[in-house]
Amino acid sequence: MKQGRPAAPAPRASSAAGVRPAEPLARRDFLKAGLAAACALGAGEAAASGAAKKGAAPVSTSARSPGDANKPPRMPVLFVGHGNPMNAIEDNVWSRGFRDLARALPRPKAILAVSAHWYVDGTFTTANERPKTIHDFGGFPDALFRVQYPAPGDPNLARRVVELVGERRASVDSTWGLDHGTWSVLVHLRPTADVPVVQLSIDGRLAPAEHLAIGRALAPLRDEGVLVLGSGNLVHNLRHAFGAWHRGETKTPEWAREFDLGIARALERHEADHLVGALESDAGRLSHPTPDHYLPLLYAAGASAQNDAVRFPIEGFDMASLSMRSVVFG
């Protein structure tokens, strides 16, 4: 929204599963600056109308035999609805949900992040020893551009991922870093940036089943102490979300609820066929005009095991139709 345009009414919280969120802090200034820019740049955005579950139970690790005493515990797999980049610096229902989630997770040896915002032609891993913090958006307050997430990289993990995926399909890259799909979540999950982080790109040329297959190839990392983290949104239609905000609408449309709940049920039942074909439904096409924010889920689901418990520590919708559901496998 450009300066001088009348401000839309401040959005009100609407009901959703879990705890009703408090009114967001200083959202109007962000939305005035970011409305036009986010629609063009694909940032995941907000004005709270959902809920995060409080008091997340600690994530259990697999039973271990005496011979495994020196091995790292098996890590869970995580998908996070990252939403608006401002969640990185605001105290709101979503950022508090991320911090609650952090307390329930075991400390990983390293993190492999699959962000919706590294969506390119090819499968690459960041091999930087010190990956840069990428501010891949525009029109936001200066405070957001000042955020740095100085986590170290892990070139050995980057090469290990290439080995697992296959050198004919994947390669290392030193030009990218950590984009906001990764760091806007990790500032809450690992606020001291004390764990190495590698990003894995999403090849936009691949079919959904191929993304799921790459996720399955990454499953051995869980027994190597690596947390596989997908970061996107289960429903991500920015045209609708910003239009709803501008009109002062807070009710979540039926197609968004249908898609979000359908995916949740498929995840609980480990129904890979549903996950692979979901974008072909009417609700899927409305929920994802482009697939970039859905595909990170397939990497997380692929890396999970058939016997993993599935939990949703954060649920609800931001800006009427932006699903903020997060998923823990294992």
Image (spheres, rainbow, N blue to C red):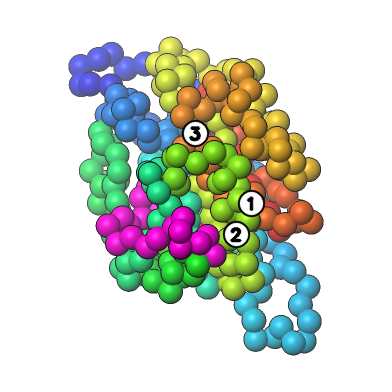
Answer few, some or many: residues within 10 Å of disc 3's Cα (few below 14, many 20 plus, some between 14 and 19): some
Magenta run includes residue 144: no
| Residue for point 59% across, 53% down | 215
Residue 115 pos. (x, y %): 45, 48
**Structural crowding at the residue carrying mark 2, measured as other residues with C-alpha within 10 Å and reported as few (<14), some (14–19) or many (≥20):** some
Residue at (57, 35) in percent of width and height? 234
Q: Is residue 179 magenta?
A: yes
Mark found first going from the N terminus, 1 or 3: 3
Identify the element where label 3 is drawn: loop
Q: Residue 258 — which label? A: none
Q: Residue furthest left?
A: 4
Q: In which quarter of the image is the C terminus?
A: bottom right
Q: What residue is shown with label 2?
A: 217
Total number of numbered labels?
A: 3
Kindly indicate whether the residue at mark 2 contacts the one at mark 1 (C-beta within 8 angstroms).
yes
* Residue shown at 36% from the left, 55% from the top: 178
Earlier in the chain: of badge 1 and badge 2, it is 2
- Residue identified by numbered label 3: 291
Residue 104, image quadrant: bottom right
